[in-house]
Amino acid sequence: MVGMQNPTQAPAGAPPADVTSPETMAVPNAGMEAAGLARLNMVVRMLEEVLPMFGAASEVGQTVLKSVTSLAKHIPAGSMSSGVEQTAMQGVMNSARQQVPIIAALRARMSGQGQQPPQQPQAM
């Protein structure tokens, strides 16, 4: 029929549909977002703990304070239950445990582990 458009096509003269438009983007995983917020909460707490070590008046302290202020805006007040925090901390600890052997192997490899090259037999 003349004048009728296919519903899957853009109207005449309109730009084609963008494949990265919000309608076609994947929905974020709520569980991953909660885990990320829990870890971000831990980072903010760690920064708050180191702030007194530098003093808020120092240049480093000012940077830490700005970071805490910026990051804390993304953590809703009272949103972290103790269970979520414990799960996040366990994840960080497990990750650290897995990295220990790798780091030790890399350090040993870099230092040569005190090994000396084989010596040539001396001629008499």
Image (cartoon, rainbow, N blue to C red):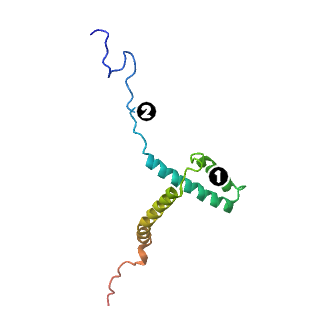
Task: Point out the frontmost of discs 2 and 1.
Answer: 2
Q: Cα distance, mark 2 to mark 1?
A: 35 Å
Is residue 73 depicted above or below 104 in this figure? Answer: above
Give the image location of residue 105, x and y in percent.
Answer: 40, 70
Residue depicted at 53% across the width and 55% down the height: 81
Give the amino acid type for the residue marked by disc 2 in the picture: Pro
Query: Circle 1 is placed at which residue position?
Result: 63
Quadrant housing the C terminus = bottom left
Query: Circle 2 is placed at which residue position?
Result: 22
Give the image location of residue 40, x and y in percent.
Answer: 54, 52
User: Can you name the residue that lies furthest to the top here?
Assistant: 2
User: Can you name the residue that lies furthest to the right here?
Assistant: 57
Q: Quadrant of residue 48?
A: bottom right
The secondary structure type at the circle numbered 2 is loop
Give the amino acid type for the residue marked by disc 1 in the picture: Thr
Q: Mark 2, residues whose alpha carbon is within 10 Å: few (<14), some, or many (≥20)?
A: few
Residue depicted at 43% across the width and 65% down the height: 99
- Pick the residue in front: 123 or 44: 44
Is residue 1 depicted above or below 92 in this figure? Answer: above
Residue depicted at 67% across the width and 56% down the height: 61
Is residue 5 depicted above or below 91 in this figure? Answer: above
Give the image location of residue 39, x and y in percent.
Answer: 51, 55
Which comes sooner in the sequence, label 2 or label 1? 2
User: Can you name the residue that lies furthest to the left here?
Assistant: 1
User: Can you name the residue that lies furthest to the bottom here?
Assistant: 124
Give the image location of residue 86, x and y in percent.
Answer: 50, 60
Quadrant housing the N terminus = top left
- Pick the residue in front: 28 or 86: 86
Residue depicted at 44% across the width and 69% down the height: 107
Q: On the picture, is 57 further left or further right than 26?
A: right
